[in-house]
Amino acid sequence: MLDETTRATVFRFLQDAQGIESLEDLNTRFIEAVKALGFSGAVYIRLSADGRVLPPRPVFGDPPEGWVDHYFAHNYARFDTAIPLSFQSREPFTWSEAAARGMERGTQTLFGEAYEWWRSEVLICPVRGINGGLSIVDLTMDRGRRLRDEERSTAHALASLYAVAGEGFLERPEPAAELPKPLTWREAECVYWVCLGKSDDEIGRILSISKKTANHHVESAKTKLGVASRASLAWRAFALGLVQPPVF
Amino acid sequence: MIHVVTHALRGVYADQIAAMHRMRREVFIVARGWQLEERDGGEYDRGDDEQAIYFMMLDEHGGLQVSVRVRPVLDWSILVDEMPRCVEGGAETLRRPDVWEMARHLASGQGRSVGEARRRAAEFRVAMLEAARARGVTRIVGSVDVGLLAHGARAWLDLKPLGLPVVYPEGGAAVGYEIPVTDDLITRLKRAHGLVEPSAFELARGAPDMTPAQMERAHRRAVAPSRVPA
């Protein structure tokens, strides 16, 4: 259980974040709140916005000097298992947890160097936007620290509202182009159930159509969204804002 | 057009209500693994009583695309009675006749193209606010997964957490939230998404007998010109 002072600091930020009038104040208040939870700093990175995947460059916050150039010079994004995990996960995860998912040597090299440069562990908080945007907030902390579920979820809530407020101070990227051919209603429905991990057989039963017809709609949607797999279909649909998560 | 389905209108929307309960079972029990009551192939809870109002977005054939339940908090709500720790300072302060809880949101196929999906999602939110305002409701409250808090805050503009996240026994965590029901919020949401017409549609008593599909088609024919962005 968080102590009363920490709870009060965190709750104040959650309540006030949307109304803070300058980016500088927002950053100050956010750092104050995450420090109350025992984190030492924060870096904000956009991964996609309005249907476009973006290179993982920091927008706010200060990574160790030279790290970003080093990361891009080695094209480390291709080994960075934290990026796909950010798209897949609703919950925060650490660098250690992301590194454990990578079998390639490049992944181990990347995270090994990251620990040396940053001299800390990082909790990555994925933040989903309304129009398919995805950002992450990296919170630095002592290596070896074991976070309780309550600390993780509280950090995630802080990061979420920080991201929403921070985006308000940024220029909006170009909106995504419309699809050359819109989905049919049936295709849109099938895409929604694909996003929930349903098979063609299950979709068929839910929508009272045959498995074959469900498959036809899914394949047609894949073609229209220009993707090859069901997983890509789900993420592309989300990134375009065609599918909204069941929020409430 | 978003259908406002009160207890008195359940006969008219019987097919859509049955479909909603089936979809709720698929999403909340099967996909998310929540321990909820399962009956007749659908998911139900004690909030599905005569006080519940369902908001529904339908396709032109009357098929259910999006739905949510609202209900006065006064006698029972998920937030106040099942998850009171989500409210800092005490959930009982929310037990008022002018507070609605929304829950069990489903969104299957709300748009076929990029712009359409966003506009229709906004139309749904505006309809809820319009109907709430018309009934003297001043706040809508509920709880949301922490992972969807940012989405909710961006979608509803004025959403504020009511407390710190509370960890579910099954894993994950929820945050209580409130949304003020104001003309200003309705205006900003409508302006942001180019919505002109009222979004909430409630079938009047004595209205001619029509199926939901017929209502949808009639409405689409009637308002088509106003949907063209200026």
Image (cartoon, grey):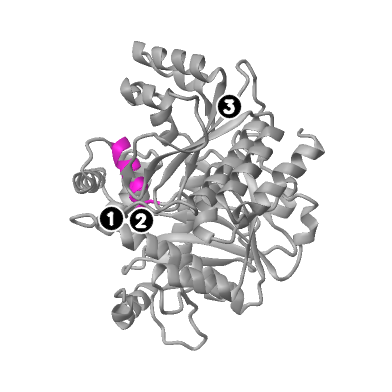
Q: Chain of mark 2?
A: B
| Magenta range | A230-243
Report the Cα–Cα distance between label 2 and label 1: 8 Å
Q: Say which of marks 3 and 2 sits in front.
A: 3
Report which quarter residue A68 is drawn in. top left
Badge 3 and badge 1 in a common chain = yes
Residue B49 in the image: state x and y as whole percent: 63, 64
In this picture, residue B96 sits left or right of residue A179: right
Mark in the foreground, 3 or 1: 3
Check the image and report above or below for B58 versus A222: below
* Secondary structure type for disc 2: loop
* Residue A140, disc: 3
Look at 52% across and 86% down and name the residue there.
B205
Residue ID for mark 2: B109
Q: CB atoms at circles 2 and 1 under 8 Å apart?
A: yes
Q: Chain of mark 3?
A: A
